[in-house]
């Protein structure tokens, strides 16, 4: 605490104690209690304000601010203690049992506190707690609670402390960082001596094992990646708790008094300690900012807080990268450093403990022989460089060591990782151009064991970004949106890992088509290189697909790819979003959609490569992004495009397609197969092409029943497993506004429409199919949910619900999407379909958006044929295939301009209107 400048500006303990004594002298106890609380509260408030001021003045001074906060609490507690034993419960001649020491434990014991951190105190007595000790402890706790402080406390005798520390890892860890706070110094010394003499000896291996298990469980709970875009600064992977775990283990094994002494223990080099200190200081500063902004113990760096922390820490916008993206990139770089330090540290600990086990075992004299692999020493499943100058002599070995690790399923030895990190600057342009280095890199990238894990090691050592500087530019780079869960480099490495896993047949259930296609590829390494490069140009400003294709043209020849391979990789990078955009935002039943897609793809090999790249790209975005609906749409597009490519552009076999579909529908209908002959003439070709066979079978049964019962309106809701959604079918007399009324009713029932196909048959009947999910992306399955959905639609179409006022009663809740600026945009395309005008609306995603857009289209006198709804985190992209009331395309400029204005108004939410008005 001595390093804290101008301590009395934070709190003047003598002045505070004097004021309390004066209040007691004037009013006496207990009347003076409220005045004492007031004095303590004012001191806490003023101290916090001073700490916040220092943080604002020095926004990256994490250690200093954390120490200052701890100092403030120390002084308050010391004043409280002295006041209680002198004024509240004075004891003239205390017995030997009436002794008490206050020990700061946990983070408070380290002296590192954020402004609203919990205060953890252990009250220790020599023996069974006396009445006087209980009174003092209770009085102090009440004062702390009256100040609104969150206190974690324990009251134990010395024997109880030892017994409980032996049996409870949490207690042992807390006491490990115990620091004398106030009270009986001799009692503290005895407690410390007994902890190290009675608790620690013989439990070191157990402590390390339990702490690492605890860490792994915490990581799993927090997302198991240090690159999640809303990280937990304290408990997340790469966060403060990981650094503290290293310190705890080092202290438990070597009894170090500070992290700096880990260097003397041989667990860190001086450079690594500086890295430890820098990362810890930055993370502490971020945590302090979070506490100051929210005025509570907030440790999650959520989207809405990231901008403000970036601003407070003086990050500024740069071309192609916003201030918040630059801040988060720096955050993830520090998290990566924490990961690197953890790997080196724990490997040292593992070897240290293994050597102790060998030394004590029956086979203490036995040493397993190492073997040599291309000059490297392999021992215990690890590959190690044979000498300290190994990489300096030949920097290509920095690539080779990782390639051999992948090929032979080995770990890279911690000391070798340390050397690689140290010597990474040896990789210069000559090494990058070296054919042998590039051959080794491609061999690693396309490895058949576990390229994902080894590429991640390579990335964390800094070798990956140094060897491929374009990849280094996206290292730790986040995308400030709710769609991408990981940084660009982590997303890319995960995509490569998924590709390898699919190729090994590990995802046949989730990705049957991709698993079937991969063995048919003409060139697998093209796909791996394209996966590596597909997002390589993000953060440069401009279209990353176009810029990435140019990077591919430059890099692929360096990697050893020939002209044909280079051209294919560049094409895949340029069009890696084409298949998902077509499948999710276009009507696959429209022949023009397939024709346009196939015209761009041109060959079966490109189609296969693109399908697999699209799958791994989507799946690697994050958990919950991939689903059966996306799998179905991509599969449909692939099959339609494959057929078109094999037949040629001019031969579409539309009649044959419809005939085959009817035959399959007949098989599904079984005894009701005659419905095809009875009803087929009522439906035009577009219906038969648009709908899957199983939905057609359901529609025909429902249509026939409604016709027989003379129902003017027939509504059916059922779980549709094929796409992980609920199928809602509405059959009735067609009329303008049907679509927006159904959309509004589904929203009122708590559902979101993810896809819609609107058909009017030759008898003037509407047969509309909607796929619906709840706000969390799950289908309605329970009968009660299905009934509620059906009743809501019935009431809306029967006029029993006034949709507009009912929807208005459900204002948009402020949620995480509010942290992002999404300007609504409307695009028209009259070339994407032969029959329809295609309108795409991009806007901030929110409940009832589709209803508002559909109502706007109705009021603009447009007929909606199909709607395709896609979400990208906070952004929704809704596509509508429309005609005017006469069935024609909308082409006049004035009409398009009016429709655009109406849709923009519908897409704008209250928050955007408020900002525009301001």
Image (tube, rainbow, N blue to C red):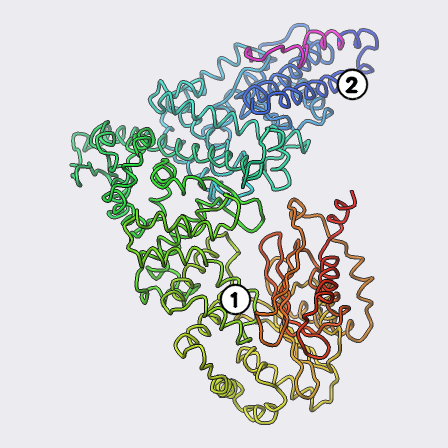
Q: Which of 256 and 818 is in front in this view?
A: 818
- Residue 13: give x, y in percent of width and height: 67, 10
Residue visible at 37% across and 28% down? 204
Residue visible at 30% across and 40% down? 432
Q: Is residue 432 left or right of residue 907?
A: left
- Residue 385: give x, y in percent of width and height: 23, 33
- Mark 1 element type: helix
Q: Which of marks 2 and 1 is in front?
A: 1
**Where is residue 702, by image quadrant?**
bottom right
Q: Which of 694 and 33 is in front in this view?
A: 694
Tag of residue 583: 1
**Where is residue 411, by image quadrant?**
top left
Tag of residue 915: none
Residue visible at 73% across and 53% down? 909
Residue visible at 60% across and 94% down? 678
The stretch of residues the image draws in magenta is 1-20
Q: Mainly helix, strand or loop, the magenta region?
A: helix
**Is 723 covered by the magenta stretch?**
no
Quarter of the figure with the N terminus = top right
- Residue 395: give x, y in percent of width and height: 26, 34
Circle 2 residues within 10 Å: few <14, some 14–19, many ≥20:
some
- Residue 369: give x, y in percent of width and height: 15, 36
Circle 2 sits on which residue?
38
Where 619 sits versus 663, above or below? above
Asked if the residues shown at circle 2 and circle 1 are in contact, with their CB atoms under 8 angstroms apart, the answer is no
Q: In this view, does 866 lie to the left or right of 652?
A: right
Q: Earlier in the sequence, mark 2 or mark 1?
A: 2
Q: How far apart are marks 2 and 1 (CA)?
A: 66 Å
Circle 1 residues within 10 Å: few <14, some 14–19, many ≥20:
many
Where 177 sits versus 859, above or below? above
Q: Which residue lies furthest to the front in this view?
A: 893
């Amino acid at each position: 605490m001595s390093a804290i400048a101008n301590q009395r500006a934070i709190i003047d303990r003598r002045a505070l104690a004097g004021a309390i004594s004066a209040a007691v002298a004037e009013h006496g106890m207990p009347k003076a209690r409220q005045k004492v609380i007031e004095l303590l509260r004012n001191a806490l408030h003023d101290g916090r304000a001073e700490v916040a001021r220092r943080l604002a003045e020095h926004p990256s001074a994490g250690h200093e601010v954390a120490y200052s906060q701890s100092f403030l609490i120390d002084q308050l507690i010391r004043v409280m203690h002295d006041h209680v034993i002198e004024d509240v419960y004075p004891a003239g001649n205390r017995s030997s049992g009436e002794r008490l020491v206050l020990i700061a434990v946990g983070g408070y014991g380290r002296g590192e506190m954020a402004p609203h951190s919990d205060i953890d105190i252990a009250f220790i007595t020599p023996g069974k707690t006396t009445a006087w000790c209980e009174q003092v402890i209770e009085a102090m706790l009440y004062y702390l609670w009256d100040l609104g402080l969150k206190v974690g406390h324990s009251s134990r005798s010395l024997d109880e402390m030892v017994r409980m520390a032996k049996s409870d890892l949490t207690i042992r860890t807390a006491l490990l960082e115990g620091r004398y706070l106030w009270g009986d110094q001799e009692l503290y010394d005895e407690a410390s001596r007994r902890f190290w003499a009675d608790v620690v000896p013989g439990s070191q291996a157990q402590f390390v094992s339990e702490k690492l298990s605890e860490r792994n469980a915490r990581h799993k709970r927090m997302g198991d990646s240090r690159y999640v875009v809303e990280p937990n600064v304290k408990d997340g992977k790469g966060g403060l708790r990981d650094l503290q775990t290293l310190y705890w283990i080092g202290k438990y094994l070597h009894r170090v008094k500070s992290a700096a002494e880990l260097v003397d223990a041989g667990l860190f080099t001086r450079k690594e300690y500086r890295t430890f200190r820098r990362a810890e200081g930055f993370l502490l500063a971020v945590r302090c900012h979070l506490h100051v902004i929210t005025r509570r113990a907030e440790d999650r760096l959520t989207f809405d807080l990231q901008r403000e922390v970036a601003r407070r820490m003086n990050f500024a916008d740069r071309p192609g990268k916003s201030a918040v993206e630059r801040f988060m990139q720096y955050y993830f770089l520090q998290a990566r450093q924490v990961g690197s330090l953890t790997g080196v540290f724990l490997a040292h600990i593992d070897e240290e403990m293994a050597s102790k086990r060998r030394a004590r075992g029956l086979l203490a004299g036995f040493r397993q022989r190492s073997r040599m692999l291309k000059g490297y020493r392999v021992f215990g499943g690890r590959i190690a460089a044979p000498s300290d100058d190994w990489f300096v002599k030949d920097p290509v070995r920095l690539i080779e060591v990782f390639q051999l690790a992948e090929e032979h399923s080995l770990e890279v030895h911690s000391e070798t990782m340390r050397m690689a990190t140290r010597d990474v600057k040896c990789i210069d342009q000559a090494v990058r151009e070296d054919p042998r280095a590039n051959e080794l890199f491609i061999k690693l990238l396309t490895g058949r064991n576990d390229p994902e894990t080894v590429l991640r090691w390579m990335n964390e050592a800094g070798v990956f970004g140094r060897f491929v500087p374009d990849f280094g530019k996206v290292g730790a780079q986040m995308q400030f949106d709710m769609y991408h869960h990981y940084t660009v480099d982590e997303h890319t490495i995960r995509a490569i890992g998924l590709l390898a896993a699919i190729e090994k047949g590990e995802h046949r259930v989730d990705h049957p088509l991709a698993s079937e296609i991969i063995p048919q590829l003409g060139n697998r390494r093209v796909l791996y290189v394209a996966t590596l490069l597909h997002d390589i140009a993000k953060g440069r400003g401009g279209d990353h697909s176009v810029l990435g294709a140019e990077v591919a043209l430059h890099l692929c020849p360096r990697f050893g790819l020939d002209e044909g391979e280079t051209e294919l990789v560049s094409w895949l990078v340029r069009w890696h979003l084409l298949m998902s955009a077509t499948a999710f935002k276009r009507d696959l039943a429209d022949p023009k959609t397939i024709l346009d897609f196939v015209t761009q793809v041109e060959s079966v090999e490109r189609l296969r490569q693109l399908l697999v790249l699209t799958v791994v790209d989507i799946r690697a975005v994050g958990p919950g992004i991939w689903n059966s609906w996306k799998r179905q749409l991509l599969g449909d597009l692939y099959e339609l495009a494959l057929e078109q490519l094999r037949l040629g552009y001019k031969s579409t076999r539309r009649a044959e397609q419809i005939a085959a579909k009817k035959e399959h529908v007949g098989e599904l209908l079984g005894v009701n197969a005659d419905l095809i002959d009875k009803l087929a003439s009522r439906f035009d070709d577009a219906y038969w092409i648009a709908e899957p066979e199983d939905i057609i079978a359901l529609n025909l049964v429902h249509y026939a029943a409604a016709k027989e019962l003379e129902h003017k309106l027939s509504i059916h809701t059922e779980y549709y497993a094929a796409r992980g959604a609920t199928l809602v079918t509405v059959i009735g007399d067609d009329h303008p506004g049907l679509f927006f009324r159904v959309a509004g009713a589904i929203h009122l029932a708590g559902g979101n429409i993810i896809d819609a196909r609107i058909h009017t048959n030759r008898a003037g009947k509407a047969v509309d199919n909607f796929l619906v999910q709840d706000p969390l992306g799950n289908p309605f399955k329970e009968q009660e949910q299905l009934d509620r959905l059906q009743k809501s639609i019935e009431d809306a179409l029967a006029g029993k619900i006034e949709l507009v006022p009912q929807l208005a009663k459900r204002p948009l809740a402020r949620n995480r999407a509010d942290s992002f600026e999404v300007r609504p945009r409307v695009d028209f395309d009259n070339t994407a379909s032969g029959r329809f005008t295609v309108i795409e609306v991009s806007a901030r995603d929110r409940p009832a958006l589709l209803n508002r857009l559909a109502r706007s289209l109705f009021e603009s006198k447009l007929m909606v044929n199909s709607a395709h709804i896609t979400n990208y985190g906070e952004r929704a992209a809704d596509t509508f295939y429309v005609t005017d009331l006469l069935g024609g395309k909308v082409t006049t400029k004035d009409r398009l301009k009016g429709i655009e204005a109406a849709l923009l108004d519908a897409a704008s939410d209250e928050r955007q209107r408020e900002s525009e008005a301001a």
